[in-house]
Image (cartoon, rainbow, N blue to C red):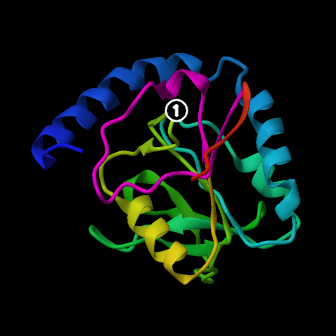
Amino acid sequence: MTDAPEIDTAKAAARKAVFAARSEAHGSGLDAPAQAHLAHAIAPHAEEPLAGYMPIRTEIDPVPVMAAHRGPVGVPVILGRGRPLAFHEWAPDGEMVEGPFGARIPASGRPMVPKVLIVPLVGFDARGYRLGYGGGFYDRTLAELRAAGPVLAIGFAYGVQEFARLPIDAFDQRLDMVVTEAGIRHFGD
């Protein structure tokens, strides 16, 4: 690990480098095989509370897998800068409203606590670390959820979003696995 300003600069450069590659992958037919792998990854957790996300920009789409899940499903709600995410129950036919940062959130506002999270990301590395948009929301959320008990964090991305090694700091939370169109990669201790 290096100094915070150096890490921030390195993370910003990594984000810039991967956005073009992610944009090219988006809409190229890679979502369907990735969704099939994601469904396989969460199958052992079919009854557990699952949190996914409503894709924004060129993020890979987990919604078909979320819609097929038998247990409760939620999506993240941003409560404010510097705070962990909350999760509200979601249903495929439920009313959605505009939330912070352009993400759609359930109008009902019914809270839920996930045991399995499908985590969006800008990039990931071979160690299981993720690069987000820079707000630290998922790192704070995973730290809080993990302090309360076991939680499975699954990064969902296109293969082109992989880096050999991302810069990390003491706050970065490692994913348990990453799912892409190429398959499922597990990250153990």
Q: Is residue 8 above or below residue 176?
A: above
Q: Position of residue 87 (x, y in %)?
A: 56, 73
Q: Find disc 1 in the rendering and name its residue.
A: 126
In the image, taking residue 19 as reference, residue 95 lies left or right, namely: right
- As rendered, which of 59 and 48 lies closer to the eye? 48
Q: Residue 156 at x, y = what percent? A: 62, 42
Q: Position of residue 126 (x, y in %)?
A: 52, 32
Residue 92 position by quadrant:
bottom right
In the rendered image, the residue lying farthest to the front is 189
Q: Nearer the viewer, residue 156 or 184?
A: 184
Quadrant in the picture for residue 110: bottom right
Give the residue type at disc 1. Answer: Ala
- Name the residue: 60% across, 24% down: 159
Relative to 89, does residue 67 appear above or below in the rendering?
Answer: above
Residue 26 visible somewhere in the drawing: no
Residue 9 forms part of the magenta stretch: no
Question: How many residues crowd around disc 1 within 10 Å: few (fewer than 14), some, or many (20 or more)?
Answer: some
Q: Quadrant of the N terminus?
A: top left
Name which residue lies at 30% across and 38% down. Answer: 167
Side (left or right) of 168 relative to 175: left
Per the rendered image, the range of residues in magenta is: 155-181
In the figure, 65 relative to 35: above or below?
Answer: below
Q: Position of residue 30 (x, y in %)?
A: 71, 23
Displayed quadrant of residue 9: top left
Indicate the secondary structure of the residue bearing disc 1.
loop
* Residue 164 seen by the camera: yes
In this rendering, position of residue 71 left or right of residue 168:
right
